[in-house]
Amino acid sequence: MSAARKTKGKGKAKGKAKAKAKVVHAAETRARQPMRRTIRGGRPYFFADPAIDKLLNMLVVLGSEVWTLRERLAALEAIHIRQGGLAVGELDAHEFSAEDEARLAAERKEFIDSLFRILQEQVEEARRR
Amino acid sequence: MLELKHELKLSKTRDEKARMNFVSGLRAHVLNDMATGMRAVYEGSVEPGFRRSAGRAPKNGPEVHKAIKPNEYFKFYSSLRVTAQDMVWQSVFPPLERNRDALKSKAAALSKSKRRERGSLTLQPGFEVPRYVSAIDVHLMAGNYDGEYETDDLAAGALYDNGLAVFSFGLMGQNLDDIGQSIAGFIRLKYPNLQPKKILDLGCTIGHNTGSWKDQFPDAEVHGIDVAAPCLRYAHARAEAQGRAIHFAQMNAEALDFPDASFDVVFSSMFLHEIPKKGIANIMREAHRVLRPGGLMLHMELPPNSQLSAYDAFYLDWDSAYNNEPFYKPFRDLKPEELCRQAGFDPKKYVQFVIPSVGWYGEKVWSDAATQPREVDNDKTGRLTDGILWYCFGAWK
């Protein structure tokens, strides 16, 4: 029953262009479709401006990706150590050469600038006046 | 993140596992640390503020809710909890979508397994799923229990199983059966004369708590019913993968296809709170009808508001307001002993228990719990938090 309900919804979403094909393949309406990932009825918001809830959600998803990278890095380090390419603690004890350090410092500055570019826009607009 | 221990477990990439780990950790933080923080904020500022203006403490859950709603900590707690809830399911979709073929073929192979004692699966083509299941996405799970996306689909069952593993951060047991194991184990110990021949689990979804009854009472014939076909298909394969002979059938608990007086135990877990009041009354009557005289009806549930402090009532009602659980608070506003009486059970034969989680406390708790009744009013009863206690009520026929 619910399958029929969903098949109908999907048909509408696909629009009229495919209506003909849908009729031809009517017997196959239960062919595999991707699972629906949006919540019916929406989600609740708590802050005066729902944008704050949405931003918090983005921040947490970003946090999840940062964590995912850390786990991946830890896996990579463990594999290197197991294969003998890296000694235990070697990564933590590593000191960059003066050359590498200078390059990283420039890249770090660029990274931080780009992070706060949105604030810089206001400064530049004020300067133009 | 808890890894499923059976054959239907999805294969996941390193990154997918890491995302699930993150969501489990986030949920543990919100439901342990932030929940403790929110109570402190309530006691330290919200409740005193209410007293100053009203001249008394809030008297029930809705009053606490109204008082705490403007509080910033409450907003962060709630917003993060909704985010985490959504991320639970979102963390499962990518590996699940990729594994759908493998899942189907594994399930098909399992249903043809050649074990001596085997379970069964009975579905009803054209079965009408009640609107309280077909019309909403309970606990923000897109597609709900009954969503089907192809012929013989069982993806919704896999979504629930894998999602629950992320959601529960270990508090629902290694096999997600802590409720079943704790309660069935406790009942076996407390009532050594109860030797059930037939046991029924209502609204069993993927049968994760049905199997415990077979573990505790291996000679019994165990049945699980639900309205959602994809969950039942998955439940059948899951039980076969775990070597448990369980009979799953598509049925509405409000109108069972079983004859009168055919079961010794009728059980449900986390089920009644998903159903409107009228349906609950029908289910209780059906449970009474299919029980043999001397049989036991037992429902594991969230504790009733009448037995909780105003703050704890508010805390559990959060789900009803914000987690797509429209029938959760109305159910918890009912009195369990009244429900049993109205269904035809003798009020003198009413029972209720607060049973410590076997996963958290170890098996010793069964003997302790059997001799030392616990109070319901406790901030660990029915709450997914460290030191969890399960609540259940029912009656003997």
Image (tube, coloured by chain):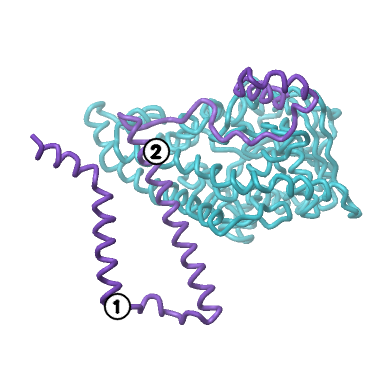
Q: Is residue B207 left or right of residue B275?
A: right
Task: Please tell me whether residue B115 is drawn above or below residue A7 in the rendered image.
Answer: below
The amino acid type of the residue labelled 2 equals Ser
* Residue situated in front as seen by the camera: B254 or A62: A62
> Residue shown at 80%/30% (left/top)?
B290
Quarter of the rendering occupied by the N terminus of chain B: bottom right
Viewer-proximal residue among A100 and B333: A100
Front residue of B199 and B142: B142
For the point 50% across and 33% down, the residue is: B323
User: Which of the two discs, 1 and 2, sits closer to the camera?
Assistant: 1
* Residue B347 place in picture, x, y as percent: 66, 30
- Residue A85: x and y, percent? 50, 80
The numbered mark at residue A97 is 1
Q: Colour of chain B?
A: cyan
Compared across the picture, whether B78 is left or right of B385 comes to left
Tell me if mark 1 has few (under 14), some (14-19) or many (20+) residues whose alpha carbon lies within 10 angstroms of its own: few
